[in-house]
Image (cartoon, rainbow, N blue to C red):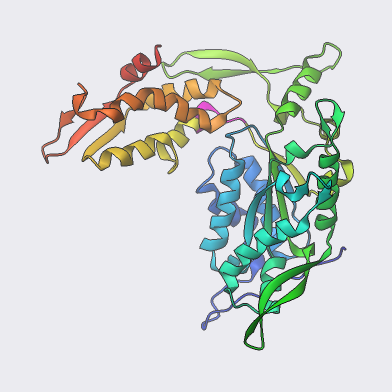
Amino acid sequence: MSGEVAAPERPTGDDGSLRALEKITPPEIFEELRKGVLGQDEALRYVSVALFKHTTGKVPGNILLVGNSGTGKTTIMNNIQRLYHDVPEYHPFRAMTIINANLLVDAERLEFRPERLLTAVEQRARAIVGQRATVEELRAAMESATVCIDEIDKMSSIVAGKPNPLGVVLQQGLLTLMEGELVAYRAHVEVDGKPEETTIPVDTTNMMFICGGAFEGLYDQVYLRVVNPGSGEKLKSHAIQMADGQVRIETRFSLADFLKPEDLFEYGMVPQFMARFDNVVLLRELSVDVLKEILMNSLDSPYVRSKRYFEVMNITLDMDDVAAATIAEIAELNIRTGARALRTVFGKIINRLEFNPQGDEGLVDNPDGSQKIVLTADRVRRALGL
């Protein structure tokens, strides 16, 4: 199915204060998403445009997120959900679900199961329209849903050099939904004041599909192509300033610099399936500066969580700038795990201190009766054996 799709009807306040969806521009969407996603500005610009397309209902805005583990795919999805809840005009779009790709295929029957996806969408829609929704209310909420499908790379049509029928079935099934299909879905709804099971014709044309995956094999595949002597391509060198002020030159491979559409086809993504995405969005590996910012400011960072842990004991945990930069430098070396490497590195430093802070020589008393511990650069280096 194709053609222009209409945006779902939005509730209006008594004062008519809600803006037209066209007035919420991609730059405004970008700034809102950027509050919770650090270091991926280029990717967020694509995501912002896709959300504008979806919410205004003019053209499809399906996107594929490609990035190593820890670069922010799930964080982007979670912040889209936050956007839908925080911006009143977007409340009709709150039926957003995140589902693993392998759950959409019956491996024994080699069959795509769209009802599993729609069941997840229905559960989110119920939170908007209530358990006693009518057919029209439930259908409207489901048809404006955002569907996030994670680990799509695990469902490629080729695995270990051999055909993967499950991957073909999944991609072909999703392709049909993304093109727009009328799916007969069974659900309990309110009919004449009584709950009744009925079939709802759900049109997937208006849904937004966001697929994501680490595509680990793709990273190696493109790297080997680039370093092949006959490729005509070469890796780029970068100057990196270290925490101690020294500068080192590194030659490092970035998938975003060399990826071509045919690389994804060779990886095992069906061309017709790929054609349904408005954009393939590559998430950049996180730099030292970004990792440092995540460590110091992200609500989910191990340092911020540890600060909250010590607050329970009336202890303030601080960290100096060079210490934070040192941790970020070590984490950045683990390029395949991105921001998740911060937990591993920080854990080596903080675990013993969290176990027995009162026995730590760095614990000092404050005039107000509280206590304080500062993670210095020297302490971090000793803990990491540097």
Q: Quadrant of residue 122?
A: bottom right
- Above or below residue 347? Residue 5 is below
Q: Which residue is depicted at the point 84% across and 35% down?
A: 164
Comparing 255 with 133, the one in front is: 133
Quarter of image, res 55: bottom right
In this rendering, is residue 259 above or below 55?
Answer: above
Say which residue appears at 36% left-offset and 17% top-offset. Answer: 383
Q: Is residue 207 magenta?
A: no
The answer to whether residue 107 is left or right of residue 36 is right
User: Which residue is nearer to you in this view: 382 or 36?
Assistant: 382
Q: Quadrant of the N terminus?
A: bottom right
Q: Quarter holding the C terminus? A: top left
Q: Is residue 8 visible?
A: no
Is residue 164 or residue 212 the one in the foreground? 164
Q: Residue at x 29, y 26 (%)?
A: 353
Q: Position of residue 272 (x, y in %)?
A: 89, 46
Q: Which residues are magenta?
A: 285-290
Q: Residue at x 81, y 34 (%)?
A: 264
In-front residue for pair 84/44: 84
Q: Residue furthest bottom?
A: 192
Figure disc tally = 0
- Work out whether 219 lies above or below 147: above
- In this rendering, position of residue 143 left or right of residue 371: right
Position of residue 60 measured from the top left corner of the image (x, y, whole percent) = 78, 58
| Image spot of residue 24 (x, y percent) | 61, 63
Residue 344, given in percent of the width and then of the height, sits at 46, 26
Image quadrant in which you'd find residue 89: bottom right
Residue 286 lies in the magenta stretch:
yes
Would residue 138 appear left or right of 293 to someone viewing this image? right
Q: Is residue 39 visible?
A: yes
